Amino acid sequence: RQRMSEACRPILGKKVDGVLGKAIDLFAVVGLLAATATTFSLATPLLSQAICSLTGWNPSHFLTIGILVLIAVVFTLADIFGIKGISKVANICVFLFFALLAVFLFGGPARYIIETGVSAIGGVADNFLEMSTWMDPLRLSGDGVTGFPQKGTIFYWAYWISWAVATPFFIGKISEGRTIRQTILGAYISGISATFTAFIVFGNYGLYQQVTGKVDVAGQLAAGATPAEAILSVFETLPIAKIAIVLLILAMIAFYASTFDALTMVIASYSVKNIKEGEEPSRKLRVFWSVVFILLPIALLFS
C-alpha cells in the first residue's frame, strides 16, 4: 500500500492496521499540505512579478489567485489522465528547464559560471559537515537576532524533511518495472545533478552580475526590494531578457503542475480506505485534493 503507515510496518508490525496507522497517515497528510502551501506561497510572488514585468500590470492578490487557479487547472487535468498525463507535463517541464539553462549559460559568462561551479563543489565537499551542523549559538550572523542557520540551513533541511512523506512514494509509483537499485541511483543522480546544475548556472550568473557591479542585488534587498524584484533585475541583464522571462513563467507553471499532480496522486492514495494493487484512487478524490492544494496557499497569501 502506498502509505506512510505501511512504511512503518517493519517496526510497528500489525499496529499499523489500527488507530496508530491512521494517525501516522493523518500526520503525513497534514505535513504534506503544509509543505505544499509553503512552496506555493514562496514561489508564486516571483511568477506574479514576472507576468507583471511583461504585461505592465500591477501586482495584486487577484492576479496571484488567477495564477494559482491556472496551475490548479493544469495539474488537475493532468492528474485526471493519471500517470500518462503526469508524464507529459513532466517532460514539458524538463524541456523548459534545459532551455532556460541554455539561455543563462550561453547568454552569460559561461567560463565564470563553470569555473565558479567547480570551485563551489570542492568547497561543499570540504566543508559539508561543518556547514550542515553550524547552529550559530550566539546569533552573530544576519540581523543579530536570528542568524542565517535558522533562516537558511535549518529551514532548508526541515522543508525537505516535510517532503519526505510524499516523494519516495511517488518515485516508487512511477518506477514500476525497474529494480530497486535503478530507482535509487536514478533518483539520486537525476535529482542531485539537476539541483547542482541549477544552483551553478542560475546562482553564478547572478553572482557575476553582483561582483562586476552590473546589478547590485544585495543593495536592492537591503533597500527593501522583494526577492522577486531582485531576481527579475538579474533576468533583465540577459541579451534576450523577454524570452528568458517567458521561459521562466512557462517553466514555473509546468514545474508546479508536474509536482502537484504527483502529490495529488500520493495524498489521494493516503486517504483511500481500501485500494487494490495496481489501482489508482478515484478521479473525484484526486480533484478534491487538487482544490485543497490551491485553497491553502491562497489563504496564506491573504494572512
Image (spheres, rainbow, N blue to C red):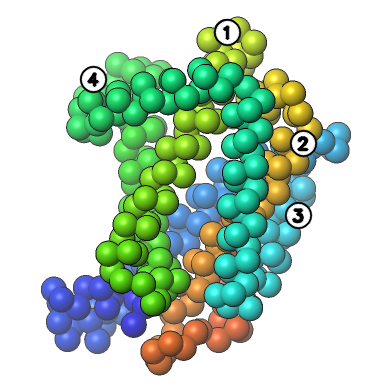
Whether residue 288 is visible, yes or no, is: no
Which residue is the site of mark 1?
Answer: 212
- In space, the residues marked 2 and 3 are separated at their CA atoms by 22 Å
- In space, the residues marked 1 and 2 are separated at their CA atoms by 24 Å
Nearer to us: label 1 or label 3: 1
Q: Is mark 2 in CB contact (under 8 Å) with mark 4?
A: no
- In the image, taking residue 283 as reference, residue 26 lies left or right, namely left
- In space, the residues marked 4 and 1 are separated at their CA atoms by 33 Å
- Under circle 3, the secondary element is helix
Q: Earlier in the sequence, mark 1 or mark 3?
A: 3
Badge number at residue 66: 3
Which residue is the site of mark 2?
Answer: 243
Q: Earlier in the sequence, mark 2 or mark 4?
A: 4
Name which residue type carries label 2.
Answer: Ile
Q: Earlier in the sequence, mark 3 or mark 4?
A: 3
- In space, the residues marked 2 and 4 are separated at their CA atoms by 46 Å
Q: Earlier in the sequence, mark 4 or mark 1?
A: 4
Nearer to us: label 2 or label 3: 2
- In space, the residues marked 3 and 4 are separated at their CA atoms by 44 Å
Nearer to us: label 3 or label 4: 3
Which residue is the site of mark 4?
Answer: 138
Q: Is mark 3 in CB contact (under 8 Å) with mark 4?
A: no
Please identify the residue farthest to the right as the structure is shown: 56
Name which residue type carries label 3.
Answer: Gly
Nearer to us: label 4 or label 1: 1
Please identify the residue farthest to the top as the structure is shown: 213
Q: Is residue 228 above or below residue 293?
A: above
Q: Is mark 4 in CB contact (under 8 Å) with mark 1?
A: no
* Residue 33, x across and y down, in percent: 47, 62
Nearer to us: label 2 or label 4: 2
Name which residue type carries label 1.
Answer: Thr
Name which residue type carries label 4.
Answer: Leu
